[in-house]
Image (spheres, rainbow, N blue to C red):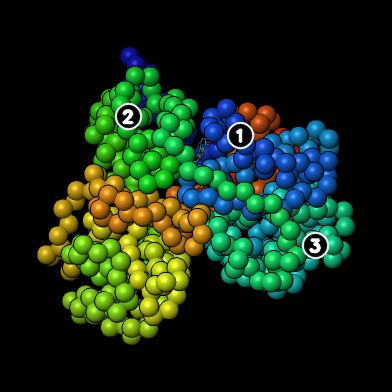
Amino acid sequence: MSANDDRDPLFRYDDPVFADERLLEITHLPGPDRIVGRDEQMQRVADALNPAIFGSEPNHLFIFGKTGTGKSLISRSVTKRVISEARRDDVTVKYAFIDCGEQNTEASIIKTIAQLVNDSSESGITIPDRGLGTGDYYKRLWQAVDRCTDVTIVILDEIDMLEDDEVLRKLSRAGENRRISDSSIGIIGISNKIDFPDHLSERVKSSLSRDELVFSPYDANQLVEILEKRRDAFHDGVLSGDVIPLTAALAAQEHGDARKAIDILRNAGRIAKKQNATRVTADHVRDAKEKTEADRFNELIEGSPQQAKAILYSLTLLTENSSEKEFPTKIIYNQYKEVANRLDFDVLSERRVQEILQEQNFLNVIQSEREGRGRGRGAHAKHRLLENPSIVKKVLLRDSRLAPLEEGASDTGDTASTGSRSRQNDTTGSRSERGNSSSGSNPDRSDGNNSSSGRENGSDRAGSGSADEDDANDETDQSDSDDASAGKDENGDASVGDEKAGDEQSSVGHWS
Ligand SMILES: Nc1ncnc2c1ncn2[C@@H]1O[C@H](COP(=O)(O)OP(=O)(O)OP(=O)(O)O)[C@@H](O)[C@H]1O
Ligand SMILES: [Mg+2]
């Protein structure tokens, strides 16, 4: 009799494909031995944060790079190592990880940082979820920081999504302005948009001195290595020989995106499992690529109103039916009017359509550029899809209000071979510029961080830790990350500086 014979037959108790699927979850934080090709960047982040180990103020740092280049990973990994080393000198370093795509107002950011660093048994204060004005939240933040930490590292992911950059000025000036006296704050700002600092207000620009660091995309060999180091997510012998190289090649098609590579590999395993296959093959990988791209696009547009979807649909029709890839607002508007009529939607004004296109540009759903200027503002912008139109169409039609469009839709469903562009936000200059569509196939797309606006499963939201793993070589596991109570250890104790604190506390998920 096998060990599972007396179990409820409704469920499965074995997994023929995955040995440890969590290793492939985007929210998983791999240990340093699984991190590939980022030694130099890790060293730069370590240099900026180094003073924290002795309780001194770290240098502020901005990190730029396209999606899936390891920005969040390296920031968090190095921060955790700082926390462990500091602890050895009895220095309490805490960190707060904020996804500005999720929390972009000054008040919500301040409140979240305060909640993540506060330990009421030490500070004697609480940080209520609501009811305080921004000024009062600041006061409590300074108290919590002063009483509960020697150094606070604030990681602001997707910092370009900040509604108001005043928070940067206040955080960076807290010591100087004597808001805090016994502690200091270091800021790591992360963005896909290399020109983000140009858009900071003059006040912030002049007050926030910082180092800057750019992460370049991986090459296919590095992606192979990254995947090889997660091979133990699968049982021995499950991966066919060509699976990892093919996954890496597909994820390197536009820019070497480790997020996409890991997503494809995980989805390939899931597809194989669903089919009761015991081996993951190249076909599973190809199917997984399509699924991964559709999921990412779905995350990007999930919150968009139906009118925005109708506008995107219009752009998709134009793209499909033309050899052009970018279209002026006016042309899109004409197509949109027809689509809106078919759907029985109110027809919005051209100006409103133009605004919605700009919003979608900001969210990295499309790319908009004003002719001759490289920026997507104004009536003379041209817009292009960043994702393969057949994927866009498929995802848009998932919305039942758009379903009437399906009749006559020319979606072939064949997307696996068209080389869609994974989200590659601009690290080369203009905010939304993507790579050129090279091989004359469909213009492709962006991924999902937005992966914040469209990041996987709400990962990378907010999290903090007073301490992290016992050993920086340990890997976080889900039980750590799922602890939603900031500043507490695994047992729920709130003792600052304890080992194994709930280092990935997050309101929404755990982190990558
Ligand atoms: N150098 C690396 N070695 C191993 N794994 C990596 C490396 N870089 C990234 N990854 C993995 O790829 C995924 C994406 O990385 P990460 O979230 O850090 O990217 P990012 O640059 O923050 O992307 P985004 O801009 O979309 O947020 C994560 O699962 C991460 O563990
Ligand atoms: Mg990130």
Q: Horizontal and vertical percent for residue 288?
A: 30, 41
Up the image or down, 433 lies above or below 54; here it is: below
N-term-proximal mark, 3 vs 2: 3
Whole-number angstrom distance, CA of label 1 to CA of label 2: 27 Å
- Residue at 44%, 49% in the rendered image: 456
Q: Quadrant of residue 468?
A: top right
Q: Horizontal and vertical percent for residue 203?
A: 72, 71
Q: Secondary structure at mark 1?
A: helix
Residue 300 visible in the current orientation: yes
Kind of residue sitting beneath label 3 = Ala
Whole-number angstrom distance, CA of label 3 to CA of label 2: 51 Å
- Which residue lies under the disc numbered 3? 174
Q: Farthest residue in the front direction?
A: 372
Kind of residue sitting beneath label 1 = Asp
**How many other residues sit within 10 Å of disc 1, few (<14), some (14-19) or many (≥20)?**
few
Q: Farthest residue in the left direction?
A: 408
N-term-proximal mark, 1 vs 3: 1
> Which of 105 and 432 lies nearest the eye of the viewer?
432
Residue 262 visible in the current orientation: no
Locate residue 394 relative to residue 254 in the image: left or right. left
Q: Are marks 1 and 3 in contact (CB under 8 Å)?
A: no
- Which residue lies under the disc numbered 1? 39
- Which residue lies under the disc numbered 2? 243
Up the image or down, 361 lies above or below 294; here it is: below
Kind of residue sitting beneath label 2 = Val
> Which of 142 and 301 lies nearest the eye of the viewer?
301
Q: Farthest residue in the top direction?
A: 1
